[in-house]
Image: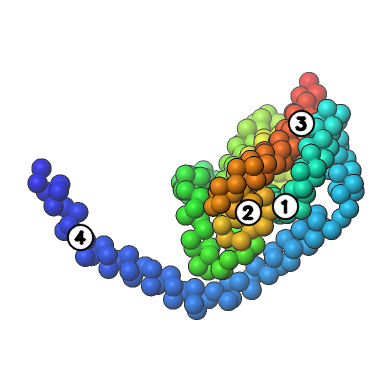
Amino acid sequence: MDWLTNFPHLNDGALRDLKKAIDEGFRSFTRAYGDSIEALFEPLQFFLIQAERFMTRTPWPIIILLIALIAWIASRNWKIVAGCVVTLLTIGFFDMWDDTMKTISMILVCTVLSIIIGIPIGILMSRSDRLQNMINPILDVMQTMPSFVYLIPVVMLLGIGKVPGLIAVVIYAIPPMIRLTNLGIRLVDKDVLEAADAFGSSSWQKLKNVQMPLALPTIMAGINQTIMMALAMVVIASMIGVQGLGQPVLKAISNQYFTLGMFNGLAIVGIAIIFDRVSQAYGARLQKHREIIHG
């Protein structure tokens, strides 16, 4: 078994040279194309800044009323609406309103971006087993890779700031959106698709009028999971300049401020519960609607 102990030392020099070459290559790439890549993300930065301004500059009663209205439209449940209002009032009472609004704006932008990117990829995967087999391993890596690792290439390319944090969060949070869109479309009843074919529906008409509406509850579950994973990434993203509830938590860890960390951590939990209950209630309503149609 001596070869086992000697084996790692055989390639130490070659491995070190390979790592050095890759690092140098990536640095050269960032120096050459970093500015161009940064320019590509300017619309995203504008969108994020506008969302943050809206959430932080709009008077708090209007924000609470707006969130309560969205919760009611989605859930039709007064208990959920009351829970949202009480949670937001509690957050405001403990002077965490601005950070909470920054976090909510970040999550909203991440969710919109994940939907825009994730749903088309999920649709393409549902139409091709070969593509599904190619993309699934990539999604596995994205879901199992430690979240800190995402920050390294993003920061090297784009530096410290909101957009790098947003990209890191989207990369971490998007896999459930893709997977559940693919699953939802694949689970659509074949008899329903045959009926659509019998009526002479094109592929686009089948997707728009049959597959997407029937897959919507599963897609909503994907959106729910994406939001939860984005919230889980908030504290880590604060390490590269993402503002919101993550930064006070990071400060509390660095300076051992127990109450600061606990209060802001509980605020993150509160937001997570709001998003979770509202999106789940909406998904349940869609499911009931689908069952009524099938019934």
Q: Circles 4 and 1: CB distance less than 8 Å? A: no
**Few, some or many residues within 10 Å of mark 2 (<14, 14–19, 20+):** many
Secondary structure of residue under mark 1: helix
Q: Is residue 177 above or below residue 56?
A: above
**Few, some or many residues within 10 Å of mark 3 (<14, 14–19, 20+):** many
Q: Earlier in the sequence, mark 2 or mark 1?
A: 1
Left or right of residue 253, residue 262 in this image: right
Secondary structure of residue under mark 3: helix
Per the image, the residue denoted by label 2 is 247
Q: Circles 3 and 1: CB distance less than 8 Å? A: no
Per the image, the residue denoted by label 3 is 281
The span from disc 2 to disc 1 (Cα, nearest Å) is 9 Å
Q: In the rendered structure, which amino acid carries the disc numbered 2?
A: Gln
Q: Nearer the viewer, residue 21 or 265?
A: 265
Q: Nearer the viewer, mark 4 or mark 1?
A: 1
Q: Circles 2 and 1: CB distance less than 8 Å? A: yes
Q: In the rendered structure, which amino acid carries the disc numbered 1?
A: Asp
Which residue is found at the position 84% from the left and 32% from the top?
82
Which residue is found at the position 51% from the left and 50% from the top?
147
